[in-house]
Image: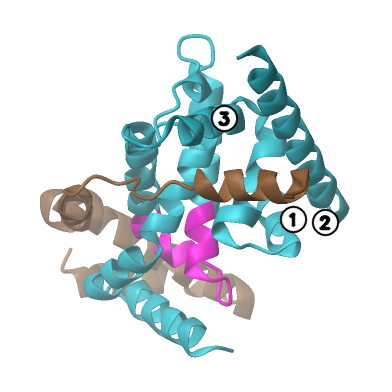
Amino acid sequence: MSNEENSDREKTKRARQGDQEAFVELVSEHVEKVARITLYIVGSCAIAEEITQEAFLKAYEKIQTLRRGVPFGNWVVRIAKNLAIDRIRRSKRKLPLVKEVDWGNPNDQDIVQDVRKVLMELPQKFRLPLLLTYYEGMSTAEVSRLLRIPVGTVKSRIFHAKAKMRKTLESEAGDD
Amino acid sequence: MIDKETKTNELIELAKPQHVLSDGFLPRLKRAMADVGDFSRTHPVQSAAGWSFALISTAFMALVIVGRTDLLPDVINFLLRVVGA
């Protein structure tokens, strides 16, 4: 077990015993990753921030239910993922969240904005494995556990996501 | 010449989001956590009721496990004396 994992376990143990400072340290270590993964699902920084806050508050209230041996980071990412998917499901008719591509800096180059739009237009089942692998450096086994799909399916979805993305970008380039 | 696969990978990397959270996020979260942590102080009756229920349930389960449910009235009397009822 790495030093980082050991330290995480120690802080989780202290947080379970009611040490608020330990919980805040865990938040600081995992919050950016949780926010990014939420963003990959909802497509908007503002909504990702709301869901990230909700996820950490839920984790704070339910820390006693975290099973021993389960890393805090994985647990809170799963909570945020479920909240984000639930939010999409509930607001689908009123608010097509995934169309509101807002990934922060509006001054980014046009090509970057175009790629983000294409990524967000991919069906979620293709988009998430691709972004978790590329942006979070997660292995196919880790993505498989988080999304509860077989490793082979993760690989094929990444392949198809890239193929779809390439096709869209090529057709857009052809239109210009 | 760059192949299509490499080009796609480069574009994906280029589009990685840098900052998702606004500057005031952590202080806001800490304030919200403090509100959650104050539950016992702001809801003392509900909090005490919750603890009492958990205590009695645990005692009852322990008696069931050791097969001495006949001791239940004594245990309840004891717990009531402890909480000062």
User: Which residue is labeled 1 in the image?
Assistant: A144
Q: Is residue A111 left or right of residue A142?
A: left
- The answer to whether the residue labelled 1 contacts the one labelled 2, judged by CB atoms less than 8 Å apart, is yes
Q: Nearer the viewer, residue A28 or B78?
A: A28
Going from N to C along the chain, the mark reached first, 3 or 1, is 3
User: Which residue is labeled 3 in the image?
Assistant: A120
Query: Amino acid under label 1?
Result: Ser
Q: Which residues are magenta?
A: A59-77
Query: Amino acid under label 3?
Result: Met
User: Which residue is labeled 2 in the image?
Assistant: A151
Mark 2 — on which chain does it sit?
Answer: A
- The answer to whether the residue labelled 2 contacts the one labelled 3, judged by CB atoms less than 8 Å apart, is no
Which residue in the rendered view is the most extreme toward the top?
A94
> Would you say residue A76 sits in the magenta stretch?
yes
Distance Cα–Cα, label 1 vs label 2: 5 Å
Q: Which residue is pictured at 33% across the width and 63% down the height?
A: A27
Q: Nearer the viewer, residue B28 or A108?
A: A108
Residue B81 appearing in the image: no
As helix, strand or loop, the secondary structure at mark 3 comes to helix
Q: Nearer the viewer, residue B61 or B81?
A: B61
Q: Quadrant of residue B48?
A: bottom left
Chain shaded brown: B
Mark 1 — on which chain does it sit?
Answer: A
Is disc 3 in the same subunit as disc 1?
A: yes
Is disc 1 in the same subunit as disc 2?
A: yes
- The answer to whether the residue labelled 3 contacts the one labelled 1, judged by CB atoms less than 8 Å apart, is no
